[in-house]
Image (tube, helix red, strand yellow):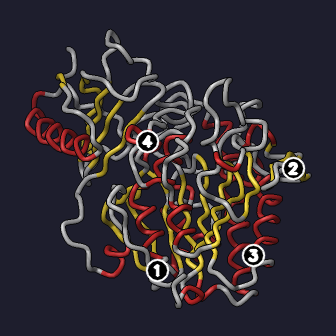
């Protein structure tokens, strides 16, 4: 164990589910939804243009745990377990001497009916290396509700129940964890909330009581205005979920301060993907649009201070290397992405000018985005795998192309516009390069059908 182990920063990684970037004041939200997160951004670092690499819960989590793309891991849709031999950030950090703990939603243990842990304890070998502390459910929305209580399972597989609002109760467990550390090893605590994800069996976003009244005068995001979907009735509760997350981030940071841990703990906050409120397809995600791909991303602690705003495009796949960098670990060659510290301290060179996403379940899709352009393709309807249950397709067809400079809300699809044929070709080249970096085989990309 390294001699300087105790001096290494602790890590508290806070992960929300289905949270849009623009729910926060520091990203432009006009209502007072996130004062604690806004304060964290003002004191730390905010990544202005952060994006998921997979707008689906399980695959995004697999990418975050491993630093690799979903098709490389095999977890390209929900309900595919993380392979038992897959090395995760928990394994790497544990080997480096960190105590590794996990609280909340896991979503990487079950595969179909034969290995179904969605409502049962996740066995130790299915926990992705989070071996020192465990209090979680594989699919938290199956063992609890936003309001009224539920349960998770501890490291011994015993159910641990609670009554109350889910985010508050989950944070009670986080606070208990922080207060019981002995200081002999740095800790890496992964806190995975379900909010603001909708409650599946209720088909409703379950904000705290009073959310509809508190946020009744919301300002609708531009991508929702004029589009069908359930946002008019659901957005106030969605903001209520986000406000609850914010309140509890404040509780976590206050606890770190009270324990004298704040100056030597990196707190990182981000989400798995965004939410388009059924404006782009029949549900809330699995889309190439920014409402689905763009996520909040904040950090505070050693190496992440000063109120800096990073404007380069960054990806969720950059986060694992970043977290390993916090702990002073050498980056493994298996991980994609790049550590974000280089953007924060100004040492990064040749940072990519685009981000890449794989889209699955509803389709087999691939997307690349630059500051100005969005280019997305998907498997044709008459091709094997068009329904999204395969990792890749041998053929793709151009589906969406947006000029984000003139059309930031992505309302005008230019995929068939002959005036943009040259730019589409440039984006096709970018996409092929990104697919190759994700170890995908060369694929045919056809122009959009008339």
User: Does 244 sit above or below residue 206?
Assistant: below
Of callouts 3 and 2, the N-terminal one? 2
State the image quarter where residue 268 is shown. Answer: bottom right
Of callouts 1 and 4, the N-terminal one? 4
Seen from the viewer's position, the closer of residues 422 and 117 is 117
User: Does 316 sit above or below residue 79?
Assistant: below
Residue 313 in view in this figure? yes
Of callouts 1 and 2, the N-terminal one? 2
Q: Which mark is residue 73?
A: 4
> From mark 1 to mark 4, how far is it between C-alphas?
30 Å
Nearer mark to the viewer, of 3 and 4:
4
Quickly name the residue at label 3. Answer: 178
Quickly name the residue at label 2. Answer: 158
Nearer mark to the viewer, of 1 and 3:
3
> From mark 3 to mark 4, how far is it between C-alphas?
32 Å
Of callouts 4 and 2, the N-terminal one? 4
Of callouts 3 and 4, the N-terminal one? 4
Position of residue 34 measured from the top left corner of the image (x, y, whole percent)? 63, 65
């Amino acid at each position: 164990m390294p001699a300087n182990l105790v001096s290494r920063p602790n890590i508290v990684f806070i992960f929300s589910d289905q949270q849009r970037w623009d729910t926060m004041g520091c990203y432009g939200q006009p209502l007072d939804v996130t004062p604690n997160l806004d304060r964290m951004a003002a004191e730390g670092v905010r990544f202005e243009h952060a994006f998921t690499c997979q707008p689906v819960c399980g695959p995004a989590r697999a990418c975050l745990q491993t630093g690799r793309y979903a098709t490389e891991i095999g977890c390209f849709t929900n309900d595919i377990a993380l392979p038992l031999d897959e090395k995760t950030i928990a394994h790497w950090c544990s080997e480096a001497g960190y105590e590794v703990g996990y609280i909340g939603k896991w979503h990487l243990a079950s595969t179909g009916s034969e290995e179904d842990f969605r409502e049962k304890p996740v066995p130790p070998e299915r926990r992705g290396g989070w071996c020192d502390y465990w209090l979680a459910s594989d699919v938290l929305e199956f063992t609890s509700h936003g309001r009224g209580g539920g349960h998770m399972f501890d490291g011994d597989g015993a159910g641990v129940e609670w009554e109350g609002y889910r985010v508050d109760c989950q944070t009670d467990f986080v606070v208990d964890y922080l207060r019981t550390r002995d200081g002999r090893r740095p800790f890496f605590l992964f806190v995975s909330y379900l909010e603001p994800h909708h409650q599946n069996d209720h088909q409703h976003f379950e904000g705290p009581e009073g959310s509809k009244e508190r946020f009744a005068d919301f300002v609708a995001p531009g991508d929702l205005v004029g589009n069908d979907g359930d946002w008019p009735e659901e957005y106030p509760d969605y903001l209520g979920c986000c406000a609850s997350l914010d309140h509890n981030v404040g509780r976590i940071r206050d606890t770190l301060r009270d324990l004298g841990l704040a100056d030597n703990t990196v707190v990182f906050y981000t989400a798995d993907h965004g939410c388009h409120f059924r404006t782009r397809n029949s549900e809330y995600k699995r889309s190439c649009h920014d409402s689905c791909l763009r996520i909040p991303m904040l950090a505070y602690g050693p190496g992440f201070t000063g109120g800096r705003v990073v404007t380069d495009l960054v990806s969720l796949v950059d986060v694992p290397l970043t977290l390993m960098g916090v702990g002073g670990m050498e980056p493994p060659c298996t991980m994609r992405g790049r550590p974000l510290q280089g953007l924060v301290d100004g040492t990064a060179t040749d940072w990519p000018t685009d981000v890449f996403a794989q889209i699955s379940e509803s389709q087999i899709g691939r997307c690349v985005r630059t500051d100005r352009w969005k280019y997305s393709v998907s498997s044709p309807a008459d091709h094997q795998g068009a329904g999204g249950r395969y990792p890749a397709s041998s053929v793709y067809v151009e589906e969406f192309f947006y000029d984000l400079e003139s059309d930031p809300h992505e309302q005008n699809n230019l995929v068939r516009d002959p005036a943009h044929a040259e730019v589409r070709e440039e984006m096709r080249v970018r996409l092929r390069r990104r697919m190759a970096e994700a170890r995908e085989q060369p694929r045919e990309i056809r122009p959009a059908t008339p």
